[in-house]
Amino acid sequence: MTEPRLSSPAKVGIIANPVSARDIRRIIANASNLQTSERVNIVLRVLTTLSAGGIDHVLMMPDKAGISAMLLRSLQRERNLHHRFPKVEFVDMDVTSTVDDTFTAARAMQQAGVKVIVVLGGDGTHRAVVRELMEGVRKGLPPVAIAGLSTGTNNAFPDMREPTIAALAVGLYASGRLSAEQALSPNKVLEVGVDGVARDIAIVDAVIGSDRFIGARALWKTDSLSAAYLTFADPQVIGLSAIGGLLHPVGRNEPGGLAIHLGHDAASTRLRLSVPIAPGMISDIPIADWTVMPAGVPFPVSLSAGVVALDGEREFTFDVGQKVSVTLRENAFPTVDVARCLQTAAREGLFRLSSPSP
Amino acid sequence: MARKISMKQAVNEALDQAMAADPSVICMGEDIVGGAGANGEKDAWGGVLGVTKGLYAKHGDRLLDTPLSESAYIGAAVGAAACGMRPVAELMFIDFMGVCFDQIFNQAAKFKYMFGGKAETPVVIRAMVGAGFRAAGQHSQMLTPLFTHIPGLKVVCPSNPYDTKGLLIQSIRDNDPVIFCEHKNLYAIEGEVPEASYAIPFGEASVVRDGKHCSIVTYGLMVHRSLEAAAALAKEGVEVEIVDLRTLSPLDIDTVLDSVTKTGRLVCVDEASPRCNIATDISAQVAMHAFGALKAQIEMVTPPHTPVPFSPTLEDMYIPSAGQIADAVRRTLKGGKH
Amino acid sequence: MAGTNPFPLSREDLLKAYRTMRTIREFEERLHVDFSRGDIPGFVHLYAGEEASATGIMAHLGDGDRIASTHRGHGHCIAKGVDVFGMMKEIYGKKGGSCQGKGGSMHIADLSKGMMGANGILGAGAPLACGAGLAAKYRKKGEVAITFVGDGASNQGTFLESLNLAGVWNLPVIFVVENNGYAESTSRDYATAVDSFVDRAAGFGMPGITVDGTDLFAVYEAAGEIIRRAREGGGPSLLECKMVRFHGHFEGDAQTYRAPGELDDIRANSDCLKKLSAQVTSAGVISAAELAAIDAEVMALIESAVEQAKAAPLPTLADLTTDVYVSY
């Protein structure tokens, strides 16, 4: 196995969540089950593409759920076949097999100075990475861009795209051939506060429900839902944000978000909406009212006690007396705009090799 | 006069009548119907040797073809029995018991005892036994001693169509786990079998030939070899008594002891491998309980301590012959050594 | 004091669930103590720490539903309704035990409660549960069968064959992998080629999900959906409960394969009973006093079970040879 003798510091990090797409939506809907071997295949395709793009050192989150182990075996096999890979370095950290691993890895990658983190996961995984990176920026660390690959259930946030293409864009930006202005896009977040103190964020939706337990985390029983706050409302995605997407679309790059109050009885229901809230699952949602959320304005949650679900998963409960509010923030974190990167690269001939022979 | 049918037909008839009489009886096994999931005929095989052919047309989804997963489906048969059904599972060749033996000897055999008497496991496992088909080492064994050894199991090995039908019906009615052995080389033999349903109790050996000079105790295919030996010996004025054990567990040792007490001589003929087989078991029990009646050493006729060979000449030498049985009888008469 | 109940179980069922979990916990902890004193013969494998899995799943089952358990079966027995006094006598090898002293800890069964036995052979329960599922299919009453295996036993051929058979015959069987991270002393990280039991389910064409096995509500919700699906003819599925066991593989195992401090950390942060108590009291649905009252009743029950077990008669020579066969 030959390694580059002196590799430059890692410019790219990879966080591959081994446990996304493993929850109850496999049962109540026919949600996909992305096997560990498939996740590793995706990582391998990303690595070879990065290598071709001039990236020689990648920092990776370790795990004990099979991705790291299978990746190492595969890398050895591929090197025996003389395929080119960057040096893959695992973050030196204890693996807890919880979401804390994502936080730890993102923090370490930011501190190591990576320019971009490739994330394999669903909305929840991306949310965890974003939260950690934003926290880092508040503490004075440089911002890190995210390139999302969907290996989750709903995948409202990351684009559905062949990972090779995303890796080409990541390579162009991380190697400096495209600037931040050319390569990145700004993204909105929702900031969820309890009693005036910022508690957590959501990158797609913050949904309030009347259940008071986290339980199996996913949300699919729509009769317990009270309100939904969205950073964007895309009619082409599934999940609770589809409530907004099919009611009043708001683009990712448009200002503002959407706040929706759900009806809880005939009197409060203004209309009913047919919504794909999970893969293959279309539900009937009663809508009371909705309004655009301008950035910076706290929207108080009217439910007195319940559970807050962030990006599709129940995250924390709140009791009577606790005041929850949701505020939209714009330009909160950058992502790699893969489409724009590749179009720019094509126009500027960045993939043309040396001139054709005379 | 009862009509004559083959042993294979006797098995088929017993299963048919048992299923007709009791809706909790189901059958499962590899290819017992045949053609599952394929585009041709359903009931394409009716068992690898056609033993269960025709049952699917009468009993439909009470016959289940299984994937190639003995430990799963034998275990499933045991589990279904513990839940009140009466499954008849086919282990195609008894040689396959290796992959599912735990379900038989650690699970089925022990539930009644280990659960303090409250469990009942009325499962029947039918399996083909025996050599002579040129099927070689892994498809030709008897293995009957391994099952007989296990407390909690019953082991049945009929030698003729009449016993086959009656003992199989009894096995299905029995409330304990039963290993029902069908000798593949006896499927074709014919015999008189009543059309009506009937059951033969366990633990009752059958004296298939009376004689006063020597007792041959045996079972399965070897009953027929012993009968051939008896015919040859009769020409020499030697009359042998042949005791067909029919069920190895429970064992009718009393009939054996009565016979040896009468004749004073014992030859055990067993197609199972010689170490720790049924012949050694019978010999030890007779030596303990009828020693005084013996006029000569006990003789055992068994194959050699080898796997079953493939080559037909070798396999024919492997299986005890009528000649070897007759020689053993003669040795008891002469008191001679090997 | 009582707030509106936001949980998926009624107040009465919450109290029942708590009582079940507390009974399992105190039963096992008492055995741990008594075993170390030399009072208990043979081997015991304790379920302490894993209570939420058995309780959350069994809450959805009736006597007609069957379960096949593992060597670590006391929790499954108690949650399925097997009599605690009979169990304790059985563990002490006494007449009047669940199995008349003939089976012991690893073989406790009560078929009248649908408990097809704890099993000393790992993975053996999976084919048995397929059989129970087959019987349930023929009975047509919407009953289900559940087999529990550990992360270790999920590598047994019987388990894998059963996944296939259940899929082929569309059996109402649920495969529950109780993943506590250790097969005896071997970590799951070592012994499992691809560290996902859920992936195995996909390989056999059935859905598989993972839940936090230390959270009663997570188990309860997931089990509820899975069991409902099986009852309605949706076929088999796999539920992985990630959990922790407090004690060794068997009593007497010093657990030197664990990292220093690992056990203390587990007791402090992954105790399903502590989590449940905190959730129901902070929601104002059940008071700490009610829970304490249940705790006291359970301690008295266990104490009484041990006394009765110690006082129960030993089996006799005549008992040695009974119940080998129904008839012989």
Image (cartoon, coloured by chain):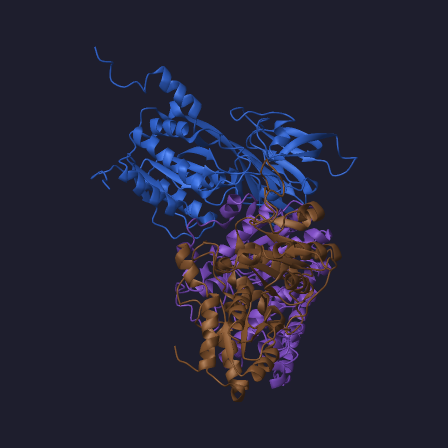
Residue drawn at x 66%, y 55% is B5
Q: Position of residue C70 (x, y in %)?
A: 55, 63
Would residue B78 be found to the left or right of residue C153 on screen?
right
> How many numbered discs, if any?
0
> Can residue C252 be seen in this snapshot?
no
| Quarter in which the C terminus of chain C is drawn | bottom right
Q: Nearer the viewer, residue B57 or B210?
A: B210
Q: Quadrant of the image for the N terminus of chain C? A: bottom right
C25, above or below B132, in the image = below
Closer to the camera in the image, A351 or B146 = B146
Question: In the rendered image of this protein, which colour is used for chain C?
Answer: purple
Describe residue A135's horizontal placement relative to residue C16 as left or right: left
Q: Residue furthest top?
A: A358
Residue in front for this viewpoint, A269 or C86: C86
Question: Chain B shown in which color?
Answer: brown
Image vertical order of residue C139 relative to residue A19, above or below: below
Above or below, A227 relative to A52 = below
Between residues C41 and A117, which one lies in front from this camera angle?
A: C41
**One can see residue B194 in this view:** yes
Left/right placement of residue A160 relative to residue A302 reads left
**Residue at horizontal 65 percent and vertical 31 percent from the top:** A275
Q: Residue furthest bottom?
A: B292
Expressed as whole percent of the image width and height from the top left, the position of residue A230 reads 58, 33
Q: Colour of chain A?
A: blue
Query: Where is residue C103 drawn, in percent x and y?
Result: 58, 73
- Residue shown at 28% from the left, 30% from the top: A54
Instruction: Return the x and y of residue C167 as percentages of the image width and height.
Output: 58, 46
